[in-house]
Image (tube, helix red, strand yellow):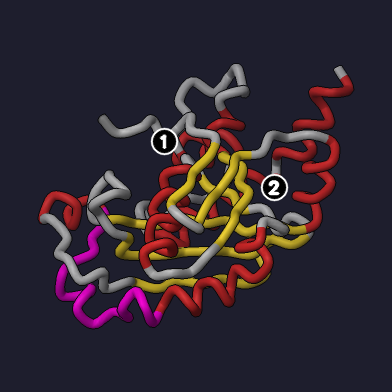
Amino acid sequence: MMMDLRTIETIRYGTASAVRINLSPNTIAELSERYIAFDTETNGLDPEKDRIVEIGAVIFENGAPTSSFQSYVNPGISIPPEVSALNHITNEMLRAAPSEKDIYPELLGFLGDAAAGKTVICGHVAAFDLSFLCKTLDRLGMPASFRFVDTRQLVTEIPELEHHSLAAAAEYFGIPHENAHHAKEDALTSGRILSRMPERYREQRDL
């Protein structure tokens, strides 16, 4: 049985790991300065056997996006038709994409000190994406240690928000969310949701 990636706190595959952190005055101060939003598209739901086919990451500084990274990935295995129908990524697109061994050093270069647990990673159901990332990095012999916050977990604490999907949270905050199921766009949306959280956190503590 697959683990529930919405609630998992710690991810570890060999020398690649990720740990969930909670909001606190210290982490709020950190996130107000800098974080990296991250998202993937995959060819399945199981990080043990499926692979990432698209990567998106966006650096946020002082609550605003400043630079981004996006690439399709040729994982060496095919993408099922039902998955292509959802994310519009085809096997033809993947055949022309960089291989894992070529693209992941570039990604780690973009992520910088986040791979050493210094800059926080965020995502919507972030443990899903980081499980795939950690599994891939371990397979490629690339050690990493991430800290992450999950914007889905954060929006579950908003009483008036009935649904907790990325699209529902974006609509609640009035954040444009176009091109869903594209990694960079979903990362950008998650990062923009997180940018609203420090103020909301402070307001809740002042009540």
* Contact flag, marks 1 and 2 (Cβ < 8 Å): no
The magenta span reads: 87-102
Q: Nearer the viewer, residue 58 or 30?
A: 30
Q: Inspect the image, locate mark 1, and give the three-letter code of the amino acid beneath it.
A: Leu
Residue 26 spot, x, y in % from top left: 84, 41
Residue marked by disc 1: 5
Quick one: label 1 or label 2, which is nearer the N terminus?
A: 1
Label 2 belongs to which residue? 195
Q: Nearer the viewer, residue 15 or 4?
A: 15
* Residue at 26% across, 73% down: 74
93 relative to 150, above or below: below
Q: Residue at x 75, y 32 (%)?
A: 200
- Residue 42 lies in the magenta-colored region: no
What amino acid is at disc 2?
Ser
Rendered-image quadrant of the N terminus: top left
- The picture places residue 22, in percent across and down from the top left corner, at 69, 34
Q: Quadrant of residue 37?
A: bottom right
- Is residue 155 depicted above or below 131 in this figure? above
Number of other residues with Cα within 10 Å of mark 2, as a class: few under 14, some 14 to 19, many 20 or more: many
